[in-house]
Amino acid sequence: MSASNKATDASAEPHPTGIYVYGIVPADVATEDGAVGVDDSPVITIRHGDIAALVSDISVDRPLGEPADLQAHARLLDGTARVAPVLPLRFGAVLTDTDAVKDELLTAHADEFAAAMEQLEGKAQFVVKGRYVEQALLWEVIGENEQASALRETIRDQPEAATRDARMALGEIVANAIVAKREDDTRTVVDALDSLADSVKVREPTHEEDAAHVAVLVEVARQDELEHAVGALAEQWDGRVEMRLLGPLAAYDFVMTQPPEG
Protein backbone atom coordinates (compact mmCIF):
# COMPACT_ATOMS: atom_id res chain seq x y z
CA MET A 1 0.00 0.00 0.00
CA SER A 2 1.44 3.37 -0.98
CA ALA A 3 1.86 6.28 1.45
CA SER A 4 -0.81 8.28 -0.38
CA ASN A 5 -3.31 5.41 0.01
CA LYS A 6 -2.53 5.19 3.73
CA ALA A 7 -3.31 8.90 4.11
CA THR A 8 -6.57 8.52 2.23
CA ASP A 9 -7.64 5.56 4.36
CA ALA A 10 -6.76 7.40 7.59
CA SER A 11 -8.82 10.43 6.62
CA ALA A 12 -11.75 8.16 5.81
CA GLU A 13 -11.81 6.61 9.30
CA PRO A 14 -14.84 7.79 11.28
CA HIS A 15 -14.20 10.15 14.18
CA PRO A 16 -15.22 8.84 17.61
CA THR A 17 -18.52 10.38 18.61
CA GLY A 18 -20.40 11.07 21.80
CA ILE A 19 -23.82 12.42 22.70
CA TYR A 20 -24.02 16.13 23.47
CA VAL A 21 -26.86 16.83 25.91
CA TYR A 22 -28.49 20.28 25.94
CA GLY A 23 -31.26 19.89 28.48
CA ILE A 24 -34.18 17.94 29.86
CA VAL A 25 -37.77 18.41 28.64
CA PRO A 26 -41.15 16.67 29.04
CA ALA A 27 -41.34 13.48 26.99
CA ASP A 28 -44.08 14.86 24.75
CA VAL A 29 -41.83 17.65 23.43
CA ALA A 30 -40.85 17.07 19.81
CA THR A 31 -37.96 18.80 18.09
CA GLU A 32 -38.77 20.94 15.08
CA ASP A 33 -37.86 19.67 11.65
CA GLY A 34 -34.39 20.91 10.84
CA ALA A 35 -33.49 21.74 14.45
CA VAL A 36 -29.71 21.74 14.84
CA GLY A 37 -27.26 22.25 17.67
CA VAL A 38 -23.49 22.30 18.06
CA ASP A 39 -21.69 21.67 14.75
CA ASP A 40 -25.07 22.02 13.01
CA SER A 41 -25.83 18.44 14.05
CA PRO A 42 -29.51 17.39 14.01
CA VAL A 43 -31.14 17.50 17.44
CA ILE A 44 -33.31 14.61 18.60
CA THR A 45 -34.96 13.54 21.87
CA ILE A 46 -34.09 10.48 23.92
CA ARG A 47 -37.11 9.58 26.06
CA HIS A 48 -37.52 7.81 29.36
CA GLY A 49 -40.94 7.74 30.96
CA ASP A 50 -42.28 11.27 31.32
CA ILE A 51 -38.99 13.02 30.54
CA ALA A 52 -36.60 13.32 27.62
CA ALA A 53 -33.16 14.68 26.81
CA LEU A 54 -32.42 17.02 23.91
CA VAL A 55 -29.27 15.66 22.28
CA SER A 56 -27.13 15.59 19.16
CA ASP A 57 -24.10 13.63 18.00
CA ILE A 58 -20.72 15.28 18.43
CA SER A 59 -17.14 14.37 17.58
CA VAL A 60 -15.33 13.85 20.88
CA ASP A 61 -11.87 14.58 19.48
CA ARG A 62 -12.55 18.28 18.98
CA PRO A 63 -12.52 20.87 21.78
CA LEU A 64 -15.69 22.70 22.77
CA GLY A 65 -15.88 26.36 23.74
CA GLU A 66 -15.91 28.36 20.52
CA PRO A 67 -18.44 31.25 20.43
CA ALA A 68 -20.45 29.34 17.82
CA ASP A 69 -20.71 26.37 20.21
CA LEU A 70 -22.02 28.53 23.04
CA GLN A 71 -24.47 30.26 20.71
CA ALA A 72 -25.81 26.98 19.36
CA HIS A 73 -26.27 25.64 22.89
CA ALA A 74 -28.17 28.73 24.05
CA ARG A 75 -30.18 29.08 20.83
CA LEU A 76 -31.61 25.59 21.14
CA LEU A 77 -32.46 25.90 24.83
CA ASP A 78 -33.95 29.38 24.54
CA GLY A 79 -36.06 28.35 21.58
CA THR A 80 -37.36 25.37 23.53
CA ALA A 81 -38.13 27.53 26.58
CA ARG A 82 -40.64 29.50 24.50
CA VAL A 83 -42.87 26.43 24.11
CA ALA A 84 -42.06 24.06 26.99
CA PRO A 85 -40.27 23.86 30.34
CA VAL A 86 -36.62 22.97 29.88
CA LEU A 87 -33.91 22.15 32.41
CA PRO A 88 -30.65 23.37 30.87
CA LEU A 89 -27.51 21.34 31.33
CA ARG A 90 -24.21 23.12 31.73
CA PHE A 91 -22.45 23.85 28.47
CA GLY A 92 -20.23 21.03 27.29
CA ALA A 93 -22.17 18.04 28.68
CA VAL A 94 -21.14 14.99 26.61
CA LEU A 95 -22.00 11.36 27.42
CA THR A 96 -20.67 8.28 25.69
CA ASP A 97 -23.83 7.01 23.99
CA THR A 98 -27.62 6.88 24.10
CA ASP A 99 -27.57 4.14 26.76
CA ALA A 100 -25.56 6.43 29.04
CA VAL A 101 -28.11 9.21 28.50
CA LYS A 102 -30.96 6.86 29.42
CA ASP A 103 -29.30 5.07 32.33
CA GLU A 104 -26.90 7.56 33.90
CA LEU A 105 -28.93 10.71 33.32
CA LEU A 106 -32.64 10.13 32.75
CA THR A 107 -33.22 7.00 34.82
CA ALA A 108 -30.93 8.04 37.67
CA HIS A 109 -32.52 11.49 38.05
CA ALA A 110 -36.06 10.92 36.80
CA ASP A 111 -37.88 12.06 39.95
CA GLU A 112 -35.62 15.08 40.40
CA PHE A 113 -36.09 16.19 36.79
CA ALA A 114 -39.85 15.65 36.82
CA ALA A 115 -40.25 17.73 39.98
CA ALA A 116 -38.12 20.56 38.63
CA MET A 117 -40.03 20.68 35.35
CA GLU A 118 -43.32 20.80 37.23
CA GLN A 119 -42.06 23.92 38.99
CA LEU A 120 -41.05 25.43 35.65
CA GLU A 121 -44.31 24.69 33.84
CA GLY A 122 -45.50 27.82 32.05
CA LYS A 123 -42.48 29.87 33.16
CA ALA A 124 -39.31 31.18 31.57
CA GLN A 125 -36.33 33.28 32.50
CA PHE A 126 -36.01 36.90 31.44
CA VAL A 127 -32.99 39.15 31.93
CA VAL A 128 -33.30 42.87 32.62
CA LYS A 129 -30.22 44.97 31.85
CA GLY A 130 -29.63 48.65 32.44
CA ARG A 131 -26.61 50.55 31.12
CA TYR A 132 -25.76 54.08 32.25
CA VAL A 133 -25.59 56.79 29.60
CA GLU A 134 -21.98 57.89 30.00
CA GLN A 135 -22.34 61.65 29.71
CA ALA A 136 -25.54 61.76 31.73
CA LEU A 137 -23.86 59.78 34.50
CA LEU A 138 -20.80 62.02 34.47
CA TRP A 139 -22.89 65.16 34.91
CA GLU A 140 -24.94 63.46 37.62
CA VAL A 141 -21.80 62.67 39.60
CA ILE A 142 -20.38 66.16 39.07
CA GLY A 143 -23.64 67.67 40.30
CA GLU A 144 -23.58 65.55 43.45
CA ASN A 145 -19.86 65.64 44.32
CA GLU A 146 -17.99 68.88 45.01
CA GLN A 147 -14.58 67.30 44.46
CA ALA A 148 -15.69 65.92 41.09
CA SER A 149 -17.03 69.35 40.13
CA ALA A 150 -13.72 71.01 41.06
CA LEU A 151 -11.75 68.44 39.08
CA ARG A 152 -14.00 69.01 36.10
CA GLU A 153 -13.21 72.74 36.23
CA THR A 154 -9.50 71.94 36.43
CA ILE A 155 -9.71 69.78 33.35
CA ARG A 156 -11.94 72.10 31.31
CA ASP A 157 -10.25 73.27 28.08
CA GLN A 158 -6.84 72.03 29.25
CA PRO A 159 -4.50 69.68 27.36
CA GLU A 160 -4.90 66.06 28.35
CA ALA A 161 -1.21 65.65 29.17
CA ALA A 162 -1.27 68.59 31.56
CA THR A 163 -4.30 67.33 33.49
CA ARG A 164 -3.54 63.62 33.62
CA ASP A 165 -3.67 63.37 37.42
CA ALA A 166 -6.92 65.33 37.62
CA ARG A 167 -8.51 63.13 34.97
CA MET A 168 -7.45 59.97 36.81
CA ALA A 169 -8.85 61.32 40.08
CA LEU A 170 -12.15 62.22 38.42
CA GLY A 171 -12.32 58.79 36.82
CA GLU A 172 -11.83 57.13 40.20
CA ILE A 173 -14.62 59.22 41.75
CA VAL A 174 -16.97 58.31 38.90
CA ALA A 175 -16.08 54.60 39.16
CA ASN A 176 -16.79 54.59 42.90
CA ALA A 177 -20.03 56.47 42.34
CA ILE A 178 -21.15 53.88 39.78
CA VAL A 179 -20.73 51.09 42.33
CA ALA A 180 -22.98 52.91 44.82
CA LYS A 181 -25.52 53.94 42.19
CA ARG A 182 -25.62 50.43 40.72
CA GLU A 183 -26.54 49.04 44.12
CA ASP A 184 -29.38 51.57 44.54
CA ASP A 185 -30.63 51.21 40.95
CA THR A 186 -30.50 47.42 41.08
CA ARG A 187 -32.64 47.55 44.21
CA THR A 188 -35.12 49.74 42.31
CA VAL A 189 -35.31 47.18 39.50
CA VAL A 190 -35.77 44.28 41.90
CA ASP A 191 -38.55 46.12 43.76
CA ALA A 192 -40.30 46.93 40.46
CA LEU A 193 -40.24 43.28 39.32
CA ASP A 194 -40.63 41.43 42.58
CA SER A 195 -44.43 41.20 42.48
CA LEU A 196 -44.31 39.79 38.92
CA ALA A 197 -41.59 37.21 39.38
CA ASP A 198 -41.58 33.80 41.00
CA SER A 199 -37.90 34.30 41.70
CA VAL A 200 -35.33 37.08 41.24
CA LYS A 201 -31.54 36.80 41.03
CA VAL A 202 -29.12 39.72 40.84
CA ARG A 203 -26.35 38.98 38.36
CA GLU A 204 -22.83 40.34 38.41
CA PRO A 205 -22.30 43.33 36.09
CA THR A 206 -20.85 42.52 32.68
CA HIS A 207 -19.72 46.10 31.97
CA GLU A 208 -18.28 48.84 34.13
CA GLU A 209 -21.24 51.09 33.30
CA ASP A 210 -23.96 48.53 34.06
CA ALA A 211 -26.74 50.05 36.15
CA ALA A 212 -28.51 46.75 36.79
CA HIS A 213 -28.33 43.13 35.68
CA VAL A 214 -31.19 41.05 37.02
CA ALA A 215 -32.61 37.64 36.07
CA VAL A 216 -36.25 36.86 36.83
CA LEU A 217 -38.33 33.69 36.57
CA VAL A 218 -41.75 34.75 35.30
CA GLU A 219 -44.88 33.08 33.99
CA VAL A 220 -44.81 33.42 30.21
CA ALA A 221 -48.45 34.54 30.35
CA ARG A 222 -47.28 37.63 32.29
CA GLN A 223 -44.69 38.70 29.73
CA ASP A 224 -46.77 41.75 28.75
CA GLU A 225 -46.83 42.87 32.39
CA LEU A 226 -43.07 42.40 32.62
CA GLU A 227 -42.52 44.42 29.46
CA HIS A 228 -44.74 47.18 30.86
CA ALA A 229 -42.77 47.25 34.15
CA VAL A 230 -39.43 47.46 32.35
CA GLY A 231 -40.87 50.11 30.03
CA ALA A 232 -41.92 52.17 33.06
CA LEU A 233 -38.37 52.00 34.39
CA ALA A 234 -37.01 53.02 30.99
CA GLU A 235 -39.34 56.02 30.99
CA GLN A 236 -38.40 56.92 34.55
CA TRP A 237 -34.69 56.79 33.67
CA ASP A 238 -34.97 58.20 30.14
CA GLY A 239 -31.67 59.74 29.12
CA ARG A 240 -29.92 58.34 32.21
CA VAL A 241 -30.12 54.53 31.83
CA GLU A 242 -30.77 52.49 28.69
CA MET A 243 -32.96 49.48 29.54
CA ARG A 244 -33.11 46.10 27.77
CA LEU A 245 -35.31 43.07 28.33
CA LEU A 246 -34.04 39.71 27.05
CA GLY A 247 -36.21 36.61 26.84
CA PRO A 248 -37.93 34.32 27.16
CA LEU A 249 -34.85 32.24 27.92
CA ALA A 250 -34.11 28.87 29.48
CA ALA A 251 -33.94 29.13 33.28
CA TYR A 252 -30.12 29.13 33.50
CA ASP A 253 -30.04 31.14 36.73
CA PHE A 254 -32.68 29.10 38.53
CA VAL A 255 -32.12 25.47 37.51
CA MET A 256 -28.92 24.05 36.10
CA THR A 257 -28.22 20.34 35.89
CA GLN A 258 -24.77 18.79 35.84
CA PRO A 259 -24.74 15.34 34.17
CA PRO A 260 -22.58 12.44 35.29
CA GLU A 261 -19.20 12.15 33.66
CA GLY A 262 -19.50 10.48 30.25
Image (cartoon, rainbow, N blue to C red):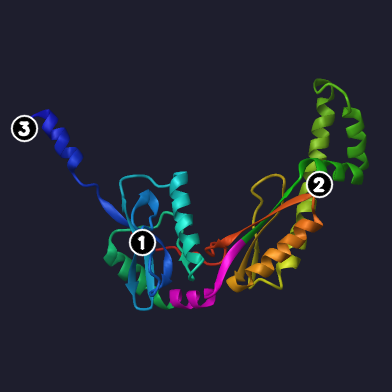
**Dot 1: what SS?**
loop
Disc 3 crowd, CA 10 A, few/some/many (<14, 14-19, 20+): few
Q: Quadrant of residue 57?
A: bottom left
Main secondary structure type of the part rendered in magenta: helix
Between the C-alphas of marks 3 and 1, the distance is 44 Å
Image side of residue 227 versus residue 66, left or right: right
Q: Residue 175 appears in which quarter of the rendering?
A: top right
Residues under numbered marks 3 and 1 in contact, where contact means CB atoms less than 8 Å apart: no
Examine the rendered structure and indicate whether residue 39 appears above or below residue 94: above
Q: Amino acid at mark 1?
A: Asp
Quadrant of the drawing holding the C terminus: bottom left
Instruction: Name the residue carrying label 3.
Output: 1
Please name the residue that numbered disc 2 is placed on: 177
Front: mark 3 or 2? 3
Task: Locate residue 126, reporting x and y percent.
Answer: 61, 62
Q: Which residues are magenta?
A: 112-126
Residue bearing the label numbered 1: 33
Task: Classify residue 259 by image quadrant.
Answer: bottom left
Q: CA distance from mark 1 to mark 2?
A: 51 Å
Point out residue 112 in the picture as x, y percentages from the top left corner: 45, 75
